[in-house]
Image: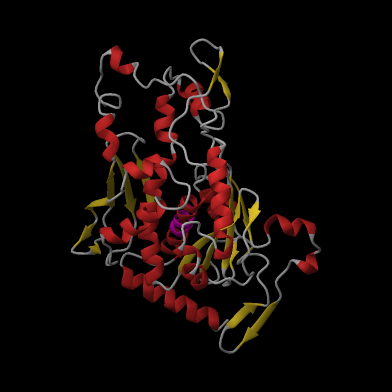
Amino acid sequence: MRYFTAGESHGPRLTAIIEGVPAGLALTAEDINIELKRRQGGYGRGGRMKIESDQVEITSGVRHGKTIGSPITLNVTNRDFKNWEKIMAAEDVEDKIKSQRRLTKPRPGHADLVGGMKYEFDDLRNVLERSSARETTMRVAVGAVAKKLLHELGIEIANHIVNFGGKAIDYPADLTVEQILATAATNDLSIFDESQAEEIRSYIDQIKKNGDTIGGIIESRVEGVPAGLGSYVQFDRKLDAKIAGAVVSINAFKGVEFGLGFEAGKRLGSEVMDEITWSQTQGYVRSSNQLGGFEGGMTNGEQLIIRGVMKPIPTLYKPLMSVDTDSHMPYKASVERSDPTALPAAGVVMENVIATVLAQEICDKFSSDSFSELKLALEAYKARLKEF
């Protein structure tokens, strides 16, 4: 299972093509639109979310409500394109139009300057348009397909925010996916402890008033994953490494940890490792889950606990200093649309990219030309693990 995304932030549409999804999986546009709507929600979102209401169009790979094994094409129309039609035109246009919305003042923390240097652009909009977080729309769309596949296999995933710009959110260590869905998934902050909601909303409002932004830490948990996904035999087959790469590939994410994560570096080995037990009904289980469901680059059958850190959104309404690439003179950086925080939306993206990696791993490990074939193979594998 593999995929590509294409499209610019203010272009006519965003596109994704997914290949390798088993035939016979029930899939509708609504399955994807639910996730797209979640991505556009959350307290602190700004102007673009009022302009766009993302809806997917499936143009290949699905017939009569089920996948047919051929590549699936997903399209999301940018409704704002009508205001950018000439500026973002594919055909050549006159110089007067080219000068409109031209960007020569790179924004600190963005891809603008380095991208322009790399590809030799005299208009940094060419970088901004593709490096924009708008691209995550299609990764959520792909993730929605992956989540549907995982759900039908009994694997569930959910996310919640554990830290808002330095303000920690309370939650139990043994938090379940079901508990997250009953709490964090029902409020606009994606937090488990709703008693902290007003404090966090006031904090976000003050940040916006100050013309600043905040980042935070997001945690995703996955249940129902069998032991043995991934492999220790080669560095690039370790599943936790693949997930870490996928999470850091999300715009503004700067780090990933599993289970105790960096805290493990401050503890003794006896305080970190998860002891192994065995029972007739469950087979092998761990007495704790300090390692977040991974051992040796493989899942161990426990709940997966994955956290990602998102830096503050670099576009500020109180812009930082930069340099004009035409004159090389100091200048205040350009301001595009921005939000004081996008943590709840980023959590949805993180959840979906993790789901995509897991779906890819499952389709790679098991026979998966058809969904029924995949389901039988997974069930047989689980039965074998219990007998070990």
Residue 170 higher or lower than 85, as above or below: below
Give the x, y percent position of residue 247.
53, 50
Farthest residue to the right: give it.
268
Residue 2 higher or lower than 382, as above or below: above
* Range drawn in magenta: 350-356
Q: In the rendered image, which quarter contains the C terminus? A: bottom right
Farthest residue to the bottom: give it.
280
User: Which residue occupies the foreground of this view, 45 or 151?
Assistant: 45
What residue is rendered at 42% in x and 42% in y? 46
**Total of numbered circles in the picture?**
0
What residue is rendered at 24% in x and 55% in y? 61
What residue is rendered at 30% in x and 34% in y? 11
Question: Relative to 278, is 135 on the left or the right?
Answer: left
Give the x, y percent position of residue 62.
23, 59
Give the x, y percent position of residue 244.
57, 52
What residue is rendered at 49% in x and 54% in y? 347
User: Which residue occupies the foreground of this view, 71 or 305?
Assistant: 305
Q: Is residue 238 visible?
A: no
Give the x, y percent position of residue 272.
74, 66
User: Which residue occupies the foreground of this view, 112 or 311?
Assistant: 311
Location of residue 301 by image quarter: bottom right
User: Which residue occupies the foreground of this view, 369 or 269?
Assistant: 269
Location of residue 360 by image quarter: bottom left
Query: What kind of secondary structure does the magenta stretch mostly adopt?
Result: helix
Q: In the rendered image, which quarter contains the N terminus? A: bottom left
Q: How is the image coloured?
A: secondary structure
Q: Is residue 214 visible?
A: yes
Q: Is residue 94 within the magenta segment?
A: no
Residue 283 higher or lower than 55, as above or below: below
